[in-house]
Image (spheres, coloured by chain):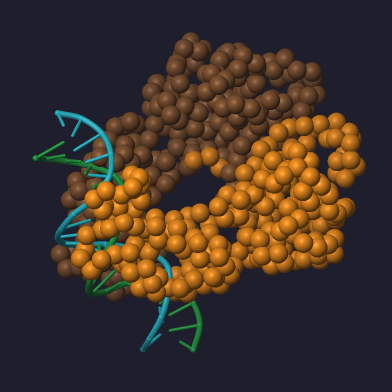
Chain colours: A orange, B brown, C cyan, D green
DNA sequence: CAGTGGTCTAGACCACACT
DNA sequence: GTGTGGTCTAGACCACTGC
């Protein structure tokens, strides 16, 4: 990765490479290598990865270069640094980040005041993917997917009703009991029970009239305005692993967003 | 800022400081100093700040330390780095970031396909702040605020109706003509015409039924579900400078959000 | 105490943009 | 070519954690 002589860019010179490779800094290459180890499961969620010095020795680069690679991974929430302890693979199974992807907050008071969310699993079955679902999940129409319908109550009030689609190939034999009994977020469950690590998600938010079915789950009149939140969650390499269509009641809660 | 002897932390030792000051790394102190110059208007939006070497000399620290300070400022979108050219004060008056704070996107096609937004200024007047508005803007109830109501059409269709409140002390003599004729985002106008630099914003999103007044502006039936977006925009030091209540039609557009 | 991440420096060289 | 940001290294020392 580096020669003994301190002239960097070793992987990018060579008098006449076949195709003009785009310049990629060393730390970026190191980042890719660490990412591959992460993806390959060399270190599991919650575990520590090797120290910066160890990784520097492993890849034959300076500690500063490894540091910069890890900096970026930390910025993307793939790892978490803890001074004096080490760098750890990010996980959804920690108390502090219980609802990492949930942007709904109470208008008054804070999350703690309203206590933990109550879950009710309405449905959980294996079905065939519609064209829309298949496109979102990057699979073929008609392939098997797990379908889950559930209701979350915040402060005792049904507030979120959502439908979830998961590629059945990754989530074999998922059961209602699993979903109902697991302590923590669903992404924590995916991680622990199925080895699926969710690293980021994209949401499309719209205002819609509560449709048939949803109105009953949320105990509101049909036609009540609700927030429709379509979320696609991804694992490494931008591979989609979950499609979720949530309906949020926003009379006592709001969807919060920070704009930089 | 640093002694000749390479022992850092100079501002944090001293055998018995009055109150145990929290540890603050050098680069963080440098960041604060740069921030103060930014805030004081030493460099204006769009202008280049001094080079890293110059700043290092000015603060008597190494280039690497200045670099880390600027890295954080760049991550917060307060400055923009351009290799080979310099580091520039962020601005809202550039083509590329025309709608930096707008999260509404067409369901099909991209922003370019739909062309620039059309503005219609419905109202622009000076009024007294209600309790709610005053609280959001960090001023006293009854103080003067500019009130603006306008409609944005995307692809020729009225899609966004919004009310805007601004502290009159900062936005003296704002006129309908100014708002209608300025090319670019309102935040660009704030910057150019009033010297107010918006650096970040927070939004609370809800689904509501279109209220009286809004339904007419958006040409929809009363009661149609619309996205209510409450935005508070801030300048340096978390000082609020704008309250905006937008109503977005989401039948052909959606509010997009990325979750890390 | 040793080990980890975090900070700081100094110097060298690369990539990019303007002139 | 000159100047700017960007990368890389090597080494020293600080701050936090846990043995």
Q: Quadrant of residue B19?
A: bottom left
Residue A192, percent from left and from top: 69, 67
* Residue ID at (18%, 64%): B3
* Residue ID at (85%, 31%): A223
- Looking at the image, is A5 positioned above or below residue B123? below
Question: Closer to the camera, B18 or A202?
Answer: A202
Residue B5, percent from left and from top: 17, 68
* Residue ID at (64%, 49%): A240
Residue A79 vs residue B33: left or right?
right
Question: Closer to the camera, A219 or A147?
Answer: A147
Q: Quadrant of residue B94?
A: top left
Residue A224 vs residue B77: left or right?
right
Question: Closer to the camera, A136 or B110?
Answer: A136
Residue A54 vs residue A125: left or right?
left
* Residue ID at (49%, 23%): B186
Residue A131 visible in image: yes
Question: Closer to the camera, A12 or A227?
Answer: A12
Residue B15, percent from left and from top: 29, 74
Residue B207, percent from left and from top: 74, 34
- Looking at the image, is A35 positioned above or below residue A238? below
Residue A116 visible in image: no
- Looking at the image, is A17 positioned above or below residue A194? above
Q: How many marks?
A: 0
């Amino acid at each position: 990765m580096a020669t003994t002589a301190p002239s960097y860019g070793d992987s990018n010179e060579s008098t006449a490479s076949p195709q003009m490779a785009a310049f990629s800094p060393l730390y970026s290459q190191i980042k890719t290598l660490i990412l591959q180890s992460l993806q390959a499961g060399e270190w599991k969620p919650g575990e520590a990865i090797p120290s910066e010095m160890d990784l520097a020795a492993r890849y034959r680069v300076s500690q500063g270069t490894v540091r910069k690679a890890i900096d970026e991974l930390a910025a993307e929430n793939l790892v978490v640094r803890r001074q004096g302890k080490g760098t750890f693979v990010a996980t959804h199974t920690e108390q502090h980040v219980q609802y990492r992807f949930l942007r709904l907050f109470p208008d008054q008071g804070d999350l703690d005041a309203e206590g933990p969310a109550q879950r009710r699993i309405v449905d959980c079955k294996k079905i065939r993917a519609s064209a829309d679902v298949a496109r979102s999940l990057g699979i073929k129409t008609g392939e098997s997917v797990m379908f889950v319908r559930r209701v979350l109550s915040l402060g005792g009030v049904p507030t979120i009703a959502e439908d979830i689609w998961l590629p059945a190939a990754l989530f074999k034999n998922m059961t209602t009991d699993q979903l109902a009994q697991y302590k923590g977020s669903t992404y924590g469950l995916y991680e622990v029970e199925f080895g699926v690590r969710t690293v980021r998600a994209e949401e499309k938010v719209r205002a819609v009239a509560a449709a048939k079915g949803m109105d009953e789950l949320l105990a509101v009149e049909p036609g009540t305005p609700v927030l429709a939140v379509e979320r696609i969650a991804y694992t490494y390499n931008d591979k989609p692993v979950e499609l979720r269509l949530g309906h949020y009641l926003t009379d006592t809660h709001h969807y919060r967003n920070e704009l930089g």
